[in-house]
Amino acid sequence: MNEKLLLLAEALASLEECIRELAAVPPAEGETAVPAEKPETGIKLEDVRAVLADISRKGHTKEMKALLTEFGAEKLSEVDPANYPDLLRKAKEVLDA
């Protein structure tokens, strides 16, 4: 439970940092304030790698590989960073099951 709270706190801190960065930079002339593409999540590859490795060490290696495949990747570095929040959510569901 404490581990999950720490992960949530880290994700919220990253989100806060992203929001502060976005708020500090006004849009350029002719640019909209809301990006057309999916915004960055603020979650780093290293953070996702640490979570998946920990879950894998707890006996869920096959499930973690299946998750990567579900996100269209053979290895974590091939996963679109915009999908990190969903990947982490599904990985934690495996751990909770």
Image: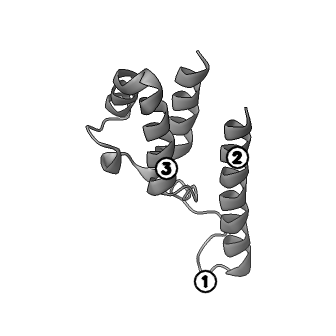
Residue at screen point 57% across, 55% down: 41
Question: What residue would you read off at disc 3?
Answer: 82
Q: Picture coordinates of residue 61 (x, y %)?
A: 37, 26
Residue at screen point 73% across, 38% down: 2
Q: Which callout, 2 or 1, points at the residue further toward the start of the chain?
A: 2
Question: What residue would you read off at disc 2?
Answer: 6
Horizontally, is 7 left or right of 36 in the view? Answer: right
Taking the view exactly as shown, the residue that stands out farthest to the left is 74
Question: What residue would you read off at disc 1?
Answer: 28
Which element carries disc 3, helix, strand or loop?
helix
Inspect the image, locate mark 1, and give the three-letter code of the amino acid beneath it.
Ala
Taking the view exactly as shown, the residue that stands out farthest to the bottom is 29
Q: Which callout, 2 or 3, points at the residue further toward the start of the chain?
A: 2
Which element carries disc 1, helix, strand or loop?
loop
Quadrant of image for the N terminus: top right
Q: Nearer the viewer, residue 57 or 66?
A: 57
Horizontally, is 13 left or right of 74 in the view? Answer: right
Q: Nearer the viewer, mark 2 or mark 3?
A: 2
Q: Picture coordinates of residue 3 (x, y %)?
A: 67, 39
Residue 40 to residue 48: above or below = below
Q: Return the mark for residue 92.
A: none
Quadrant of image for the C terminus: top right
Q: Nearer the viewer, mark 2 or mark 1?
A: 2
Which element carries disc 2, helix, strand or loop?
helix
Q: Picture coordinates of residue 57 (x, y %)?
A: 43, 32
Residue at screen point 31% across, 35% down: 72
Q: Picture coordinates of residue 58 (x, y %)?
A: 47, 27
* Gap between marks 1 and 3 measured at Cα: 23 Å
Q: In the rendered structure, are the residues bearing label 2 and label 1 in contact, judged by CB atoms less than 8 Å apart?
A: no
Inspect the image, locate mark 3, and give the three-letter code of the amino acid beneath it.
Ala
